[in-house]
Image: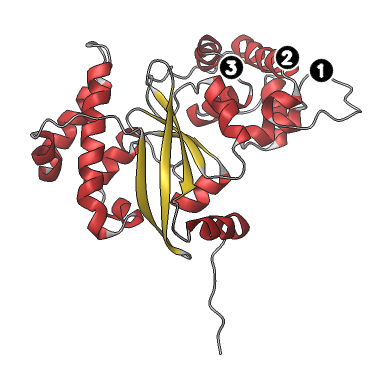
């Protein structure tokens, strides 16, 4: 990457960092801030980077940032879609298609997610690609941040990777399959005709999954706005939850959050989930 472009990348990051108030990203403002906006270490923490690495980026030095790091920085700095694309170009990385794991996250949705600290919640695309999870969502359904390409979609993994289904009791698999396919048909219809992302996924699933092909042939269509689900947790057993969705105006992104189902013991289980987080529960030995 050219040194001039790298220097501009550092300058751009610094300018975006200085315009953000700590309270905008859920951080305390504090009485002794000598610099405008966020501190470098705060941006590094929000983006999941080391402080030394982020410092190198702002100095226009260091290694070329990965596409995943650029996406994380764009979210941490609350960049607009145009600013995010500009950051990709400064880093000599291809601007990702909308809908993938590196999609620009709607700032309002991200702000809402950051305020949901006591319930599992995550941001997903209309093709069920997870964009951001809060810690309780990771504890409840697992970390989805490492999936790439087509496998970034939970919907695609559902029909191609049997381990994905372990999250649900086997008796519920058929219900989930039908709900996912109906939701995909609705999402694909809402997208523009020139958008090939959904059609490519549908074509791939028709080729590799007879189950998907059979359900797709039924032509059911329905967005998933709210569901009642049973989820298998490795330590706490079955947790019954309500799954609620808030859609962006164009329908491309959803804020999904989980609440305990009324009339079950799930409220206590979710409280316990907040305590244990992602740690393993080890049975005592005698």
> Which of the two labelled residues, at mark 3 and mark 2, occupies the earlier sequence position?
2
Residue 32 spot, x, y in % from top left: 91, 28
Please name the residue that numbered disc 2 is placed on: 19
> Which of the two labelled residues, at mark 2 and mark 1, occupies the earlier sequence position?
2
Badge 2 marks a residue whose secondary structure is loop
Q: Residue furthest right?
A: 32
Badge 3 marks a residue whose secondary structure is loop
Residue 160 visible to an observer of this rendering: no
Please name the residue that numbered disc 3 is placed on: 79
> Which of the two labelled residues, at mark 3 and mark 1, occupies the earlier sequence position?
1
Q: Residue furthest front?
A: 263
Residue 97 spot, x, y in % from top left: 37, 19
Left or right of 93 in this view: 36: right
Query: Quarter holding the C terminus?
Result: bottom right
The residue depicted at 21 percent of the width and 25 percent of the height is 200
Please name the residue that numbered disc 1 is placed on: 36
Left or right of 57 in this view: 105: left
Few, some or many residues within 10 Å of mark 1 (<14, 14–19, 20+): few
The residue depicted at 56 percent of the width and 33 percent of the height is 113
Between residue 17 and residue 58, name the one nearer to us: 17
Q: Determine the CA span between mark 3 and mark 2.
A: 11 Å
Q: Residue furthest bottom?
A: 286
Residue 153 visible to an observer of this rendering: yes
């Amino acid at each position: 990457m050219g040194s001039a472009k790298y220097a501009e990348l550092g300058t751009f990051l610094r300018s975006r960092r200085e315009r953000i108030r700590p309270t905008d990203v859920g951080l305390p403002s504090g009485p002794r801030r000598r610099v405008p906006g966020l501190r470098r270490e705060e941006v590094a923490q929000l983006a999941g980077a080391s402080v030394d690495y982020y410092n190198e980026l702002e100095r226009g030095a260091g290694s070329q940032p990965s596409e995943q790091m650029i996406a994380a920085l764009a979210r941490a700095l609350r960049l607009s879609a145009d600013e995010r694309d500009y950051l990709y170009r400064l880093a000599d990385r291809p601007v990702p298609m909308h809908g993938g794991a590196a999609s620009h996250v709607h700032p309002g949705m991200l702000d809402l997610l950051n305020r949901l600290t006591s319930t599992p919640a995550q941001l997903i695309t209309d093709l069920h690609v997870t964009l951001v999870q809060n810690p309780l969502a990771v504890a409840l359904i697992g970390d989805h941040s490492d999936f790439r390409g087509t496998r970034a979609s939970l919907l695609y993994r559902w029909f191609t990777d049997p381990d994905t289904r372990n999250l649900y009791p086997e008796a519920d698999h058929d219900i989930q399959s039908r709900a996912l396919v109906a939701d995909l048909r609705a999402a694909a219809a809402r997208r523009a005709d020139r958008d090939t992302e959904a059609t490519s996924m549908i074509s791939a699933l028709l080729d590799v999954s007879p189950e998907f092909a059979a359900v797709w042939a039924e032509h059911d269509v329905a967005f998933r706005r709210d569901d009642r689900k049973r989820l298998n947790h490795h330590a706490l057993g079955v947790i019954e939850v309500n799954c609620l969705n808030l859609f962006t105006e164009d329908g491309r992104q959803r804020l999904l959050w989980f609440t305990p189902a009324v009339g079950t013991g799930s409220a206590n289980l979710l409280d316990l989930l907040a305590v244990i987080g992602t740690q393993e529960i080890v049975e005592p030995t005698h």
